Amino acid sequence: MRKEVAKTHAETSQQVALRLKEFINHNPGALVCLAAGDTPLSAYAALIEMQKNGEVDLSSAYYAGLDEWVGLGYENKGSCRQVMEDHFYRPAGIPQAHIHVFDGKAADQQEQAREMEAFIASHGEIQLTVLGIGLNGHVGFNEPQTPQAEGCLLVELDEVTRQVSAKYFDTPIPVEKGITLSLAQLGKAREILLMATGAKKREIVHRILNAPFTPEVPASMLTYEDKTTFYLDEAALGE
Ligand code: F6R
């Protein structure tokens, strides 16, 4: 795994946006998977600015959602769908036909998993993914105790994730389950951009850096030498 350490969150965001721009320009029609959460939002904003300057056509790519809180949909502020729709897909002008996301409100979540798997299969594989990291080391909703499996998974949320979820919602919503692309699915991507910024992530960053390929720290399972880049700011690295 390569490490890219920038001074600030803003600089890390710029680096990630540049890499995304380059990748999308060189791989028209590629399927990309972008995390929601707070960490990558400035990178997406920077990428949209690049498009405004004519540097990239973001609608040349296709987008698979990474995960969703079961029970939540676009109308819930803080759902993955709302975050990505309002911060990326809509301002970037991505056609709906280029986007497939989980519907956390659907009654049959297994069906949501199958539909996502079929969408990904129709594009071959995810080629590039941008992932944030939870305080417990999760990526998507692959929690420390989530059994490893192929495709998409329905997951019991970890206590840490339930507590942290409050930061996304206007009013408390008791979340219990998530639906997510599995580590196996994400690991098939040609390129993986892991992001962690801010002092709160320092402890988990150290665990990832010091113990690769440990199921208790799911992000560490994606620290491939040849295709993963860990984008950090100095606060997260703490050196
Ligand atoms: C979001 C997601 C999560 C977050 C992670 C970090 O789609 O899959 O795994 O990336 O929880 O969240 P932030 O960036 O808010 O610290």
Image (cartoon, rainbow, N blue to C red):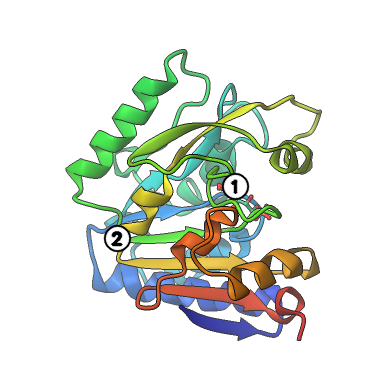
Secondary structure of residue under mark 2: loop
Residue beneath the point at 41% across and 59% down: 129
Instruction: Report how far apart the C-alphas of labels 1 and 2 lie in the structure.
Output: 25 Å
Say whether residue 12 is left or right of residue 181: right
Report if residue 88 is visible in the image: yes
Residue behind label 1 places its C-beta within 8 angstroms of ligand 1: no
Say whether residue 153 is left or right of residue 61: right
Say whether residue 113 is left or right of residue 155: left
Label 2 belongs to which residue?
127
Is residue 4 placed above or below 10 in the rendered structure? below
Residue beneath the point at 37% across and 45% down: 64
Q: Quadrant of residue 234?
A: bottom right
Q: Where residue 212 appears, x then y in whole percent? A: 52, 69
Say whether residue 205 is left or right of residue 117: right
Label 1 belongs to which residue?
144
Q: Quadrant of residue 96?
A: top left
Report the front residue among 52 and 178. 178
Residue 112 - label: none
Q: Label 2 neighbourhood size at 10 Å, few (<14), some (14-19), many (20+)?
A: some
Q: Earlier in the sequence, mark 1 or mark 2?
A: 2
Is residue 44 placed above or below 145 in the rendered structure? below
Residue beneath the point at 74% across and 26% down: 173
The amino acid marked with disc number 1 is Pro
Secondary structure of residue under mark 1: loop
The amino acid marked with disc number 2 is Gln
Tag nearer the camera, 1 or 2:
1
Q: Where residue 55 appears, x then y in whole percent? A: 38, 75
Report the front residue among 162 and 68. 162
